[in-house]
Image: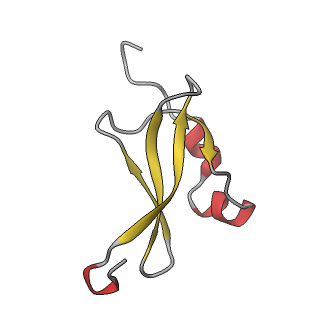
Amino acid sequence: MNDDKGEGVAIANLIGKDRSSVVGWVYRWGTGALGVTWGVEGPQPVFEIQPDLGDAEKREIDFDRLMKILPPSGV
């Protein structure tokens, strides 16, 4: 990780409602903050995080809200 360039490291996969697709990633940025980055399809409903994160980390990325995202139209 290069803090000078604001880079982060993916620490977990966001697994979609189909329970097999990776729909996004949780990143820990050089500042220590967590953030979510989505795949090319954009925000998707999330079923779980692999590997699982602690409760404080889940609150930081608002995991409850990620589980309630509406699927894209046509799905």
Q: Where is residue 75 in the image (x, y as percent from the top left)?
A: 42, 14
- Which quarter of the picture shows residue 68? top right
Q: Residue visible at 67% across and 57% down? A: 53
46 left or right of 22?
right
Front-most of 64 and 38?
38
Specify the farthest residue to the right: 55
Q: Residue visible at 68% across and 52% down? A: 52
Q: Position of residue 64 (x, y in %)?
A: 65, 45
- Which quarter of the picture shows residue 5? bottom left
Q: Which color scheme does this rendered protein use?
A: secondary structure
1 left or right of 56?
left
Q: How many labels does the image show?
A: 0
Specify the farthest residue to the top: 74
Q: Quadrant of the N terminus?
A: bottom left
Q: Where is residue 17 in the image (x, y as percent from the top left)?
A: 57, 26
40 left or right of 20?
left
Q: Residue visible at 39% across and 24% down? A: 72
Front-most of 70 and 26?
26
Q: Position of residue 66 (x, y in %)?
A: 55, 43
Q: With respect to residue 20, does 9 lie above or below?
A: below
Specify the farthest residue to the left: 5
Q: With respect to residue 47, does 7 lie above or below?
A: below
29 left or right of 6?
right
Q: Residue visible at 65% across and 57% down? A: 58
